[in-house]
Image (cartoon, helix red, strand yellow):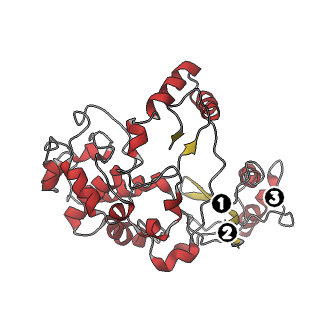
Amino acid sequence: MDQSEGERLTNAIDGGTRATNRNERMDIRMTAGQGRDNAFVSGGGDALEPGVAEGWGKLADAFRANFEAPGEVGAACSVCVGGRPVANLWGGLADREANRPWRKNTVVHVASTTKGATAICAHLLAQRGELDLDAPVAQYWPEFGANGKEQIKVRWLLSHQAGLPLVDGSLTFEQACAWHPVIRAIEAQKPLWQPGTEHVYHAVTFGFVVGEVVRRITGKSLGTFFAEEVAAPLGLSAWIGLPEEQEHRVARLHYAAPFSVEELLAGMIATTGLDAETVTAWVESMWSPGSIQMRVGELGGALDNASGEYVLTRAWRAAEFPAAACKPYKASRSAAPGTSRGP
């Protein structure tokens, strides 16, 4: 990177309509590629100097504005385009109660995007010829083949078509953290539909069923396989099951204020472009009491999504939940009793 390009990267943040000033109240810092000490690693090309690439000043403005409305506590943003880093930003607090600042090596709970990391592990085995995506799951995990699951293909686990979006039984949080009780429960139950014919988001079970296939093939837990075969070679600060020695780096989650069903509906109408009647029917069918969507995130009662406090615990961060879950919103509209919360 020549000097002129470096200067542009350093100063481009000032090119936005309301550019960030280092002397202002909110100090937004720009990360470079810091290898294993950085949770937001730049990929490809030269490491980004402090700043954003030329033409990306408005991104920095938008990042800063998020701290003013709706009032972000702490955050980071890393953007690469065509393998070239164009922005690495961080700012605010990693822990509001402790007044601990967000730093270049702060790590965060990433929730359902863990499914992508889990799928990478499965596809890595497929690439090596150790996993056939069209083979029955029972070929690798014989106990899985009970109660109508004999012909479920591996690819149906990955595409949310296995008919196993929830645990049809009772589990405690401690059992869920222990892994094997969840596996035993899934082995015993029947699919909710003819596998391969329908799709329902396997919000939490995805990680367990795909992770168990990886474990049966490799003899390693999914978190161990991911750490050794994916994260370590790439120098990533990423884990499925956080090591205790990394606890000091974790940002504390602060839940946003609950929003109403009306706010949810308005947002979905604006986002999807669908009419109000369609969106209302969609929301009420998904998040009515006893609906599949309401039950999937509970994992047989192991996860208390009414409070979401479990995601703040060391036990949750230490356990391997290769799909994750987050606290839902709490709705307030009495006219729609079936929609009191959602993911």
Query: Cβ–Cβ below 8 Å for labels 1 and 3?
Result: no
Q: CA distance from mark 2 to mark 1?
A: 7 Å
- Res. 100 image quadrant: bottom right
**What's the residue at 36%, 65% (across, down)?**
174
Q: Residues within 10 Å of mark 3 (few under 14, many from 20)?
A: many
Identify which amino acid the numbered label 3 is placed on. Answer: Thr
Along the polypeptide, which appears first: circle 2 or circle 1? 1
Residue in the picture at 49% in, 29% down: 284
Residue 199 quadrant? top left
Cα–Cα gap, marks 3 and 2: 17 Å
SS label for mark 1: strand
In the image, 103 versus 204, the foreground residue is 204
Of residues 278 and 11, the one drawn nearer to the viewer in this rendering: 278
Distance between mark 1 and mark 3 Cα atoms: 16 Å
Instruction: Tell whether label 1 touches label 2 (CB within 8 Å).
Output: yes
Residue 75 badge: 1
- Residue 335 % position (x, y): 58, 26
Q: Earlier in the sequence, mark 1 or mark 3?
A: 3
Residue placed under numbered mark 3 in the picture: 20
31 vs 302: above or below? below
- Amino acid tagged 1: Ala
Percent of width and height locating residue 263: 65, 34
Amino acid residing under circle 2: Trp
Q: Which mark is residue 102?
A: 2
Mark 1 crowdedness (10 Å alpha carbons): few <14, some 14-19, many ≥20: many
Image quadrant holding the N terminus, namely bottom right
Q: Nearest the camera: 210 or 292?
A: 292
| Residue 190, horizontal then vertical, whole percent | 20, 42
